[in-house]
């Protein structure tokens, strides 16, 4: 059976952007959240689908705890951030945000599909989908069953991260989804006293990695203490990263083209 779908269930969503890495701990969810917040500040109508079912973190980053509602027809009304971003995440359905979701792959895939089919997203300029690490059922569900406009790959400077990110990139090519670009996170840190820049995890070669994928290198982000604190406090929506600004501009330019 052909599992490819069209955007017929949500014809008023212009762009569906998947943020993936293949490897955990590289800042994929933070990148997805920064992208959603940046697009919203640019005047876009934005939704954010947390497809990382067993490691959901999006509500925490935005300080959102209210559960989604249901309309009379069984549709799911997503939660809303203070800035107007529509959010759906399994964490909003849990009694406590640190409750473990111990599900097998088919049930996880079913939940992701329900987040797409049953949530009343309404008209959106962009729906950002935060993928879990890896190339298993959850990622395959998103890439094959949702009308992905483009995939944004997040990596870090380590060779180990590059190796695993290549797996994610190869997966996107196997299912014929375009890679919108590559973002490198944790590229450097600055000394708080002298401002000197240190490449803690090695020399960056994300531009070469992007070229290998036939995709643009969108930009690099350093380690930012204020960014981490904003996420922990649920205030990432109000944080504006100087490093992320050119990345956002590049994504907007690519989407316009």
Image (cartoon, rainbow, N blue to C red):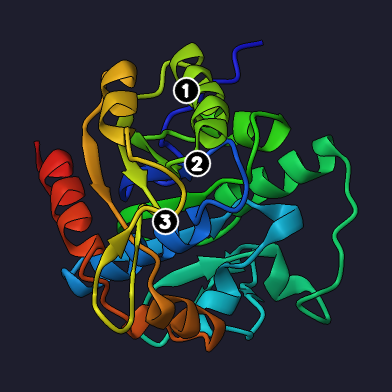
Residue plotted at (49% across, 23% down): 166
Q: Which residue is mark 3?
A: 186
Q: CA distance from mark 3 to mark 2?
A: 16 Å
Residue plotted at (85% across, 59% down): 101
Q: For this rendering, which residue is in front, 235 or 212?
A: 212
Residue plotted at (38% across, 44% down): 17
Q: Looking at the rendering, which quadrant does residue 192 occupy?
A: bottom left
Residue 44: percent from left, percent from top: 22, 65
Q: Which residue is mark 1?
A: 172
Q: For this rendering, which residue is in front, 187 or 33?
A: 187
Q: Is residue 11 left or right of residue 1?
A: left
Mark before the other along the chain sequence, 3 or 2: 2
Residue 221: percent from left, percent from top: 31, 57
Q: Which residue is mark 2?
A: 20
Q: On residue 132, which mark appears?
A: none
Looking at the picture, does residue 153 appear above or below residue 55?
A: above
Q: For this rendering, which residue is in front, 206 or 6?
A: 206
Tags 2 and 1 touching, CB below 8 Å: yes
Q: CA distance from mark 3 to mark 1?
A: 23 Å
Looking at the rendered structure, the secondary structure element under dot 2 is strand
Quadrant location of the C terminus in the rendered image: top left
Q: Is residue 192 visible?
A: yes
Q: CA distance from mark 2 to mark 1?
A: 10 Å
């Amino acid at each position: 059976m052909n599992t490819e779908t069209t955007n017929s269930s949500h014809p008023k969503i212009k762009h569906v952007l998947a943020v993936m890495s293949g490897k955990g701990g590289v800042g994929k969810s933070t990148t997805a959240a920064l992208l959603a917040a940046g697009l919203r500040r640019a005047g876009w109508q934005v939704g954010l689908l947390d497809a990382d079912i067993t490691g959901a973190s999006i509500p925490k980053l935005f300080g959102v705890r209210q559960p989604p509602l249901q309309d009379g027809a069984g549709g799911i009304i997503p939660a809303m951030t203070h800035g107007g971003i529509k959010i759906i995440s399994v964490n909003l359905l849990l009694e406590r945000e640190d409750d473990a979701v111990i599900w097998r792959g088919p049930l996880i895939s079913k939940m992701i599909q329900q987040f797409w089919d049953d949530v009343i997203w309404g008209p959106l300029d962009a729906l950002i989908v935060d993928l879990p690490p890896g190339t298993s059922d959850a990622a395959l569900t998103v890439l094959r069953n949702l009308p992905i406009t483009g995939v944004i790959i997040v990596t870090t400077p380590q060779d180990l991260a590059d190796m695993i990110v290549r797996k994610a990139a190869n997966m996107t090519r196997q299912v014929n989804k375009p890679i919108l670009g590559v973002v490198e996170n944790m590229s450097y840190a600055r000394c708080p006293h002298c401002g000197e820049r240190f490449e803690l995890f090695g020399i960056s070669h994300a531009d070469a990695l992007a070229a290998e994928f036939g995709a643009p290198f969108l930009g690099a982000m350093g380690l930012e203490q204020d960014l981490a604190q904003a996420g922990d406090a649920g205030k990432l929506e109000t944080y504006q990263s100087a490093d992320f600004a050119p990345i956002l501009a590049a994504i907007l330019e690519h989407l316009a083209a």
